[in-house]
Image (cartoon, grey):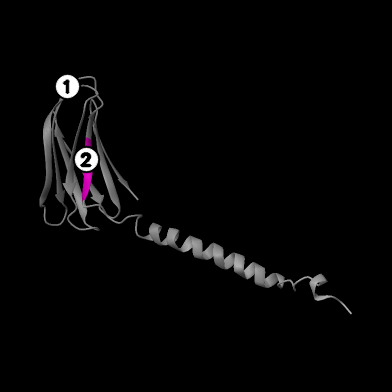
């Protein structure tokens, strides 16, 4: 007769162990994937705008941010920037998926860029000697 204390407990079948491991892994990934689909934290209430003078001369500029459809002015910045200087501002998000137009005027010329507001996090404007670069960062 075999003593029950000597008998090891029955082992779980391998497929049960695998199912449990996969189930745990999937359960831990679901919140991460849900965060990615929402843009991790959702749309911010306002978007920062940074203007940088990348030229070697003092530059005067005027910047406006409007909605593309209605032309509502959301932000206006301007002034004189020393070489290498930065100026920051922000504009309120009209709608999460709105399209915005950023217009920059300097030295009698104007540049504009339409920006998709979906997941928009920031707008950077670089004023160079002969051009203006407008870059939008989104998630």
Q: Residue at x 20, y 50 (%)?
A: 100
Q: Which residue is mark 2?
A: 49
User: Is 137 situated above or below 10?
Assistant: above
Cα–Cα span, label 2 and label 1: 20 Å
Q: Which residues are magenta?
A: 46-50
Q: At 30% from the left edge and 56% from the top edge, which residue is drawn?
A: 42
Q: Nearer the viewer, residue 13 or 105?
A: 13
Residue under label 1: 58
Residue 114, image x, y percentages: 22, 48
**Quarter where residue 80 is shown:** top left
**Observer-nearest of 26 and 81:** 26
Q: Position of residue 79 (x, y in %)?
A: 11, 30
Of discs 2 and 1, which sits in the foreground? Answer: 2
Q: Outermost residue, top direction?
A: 56
Residue 50's place in the image compared with 9, above or below, is above
* Among numbered discs 2 and 1, the one appearing first in the sequence: 2
- The N terminus appears in which quarter of the rendering? bottom right
């Amino acid at each position: 007769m075999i003593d029950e204390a000597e008998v090891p407990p029955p082992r779980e079948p391998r497929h049960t162990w695998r199912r449990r491991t996969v189930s745990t892994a999937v359960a831990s990934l679901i919140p991460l994937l849900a965060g990615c689909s929402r843009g991790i934290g959702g749309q911010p209430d306002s978007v920062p705008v940074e203007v940088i003078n990348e030229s070697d001369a003092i530059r005067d500029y005027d910047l406006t941010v409007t909605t593309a459809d209605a032309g509502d002015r959301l932000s206006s910045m301007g002034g004189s920037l020393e070489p290498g200087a930065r100026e920051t501002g922000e504009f309120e998000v009209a709608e999460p998926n709105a399209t915005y137009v950023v217009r920059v005027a300097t030295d009698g010329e104007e540049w504009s860029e339409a920006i998709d507001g979906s997941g928009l996090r920031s707008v950077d404007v670089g004023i160079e000697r002969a051009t203006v670069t407008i870059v939008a960062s989104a998630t």
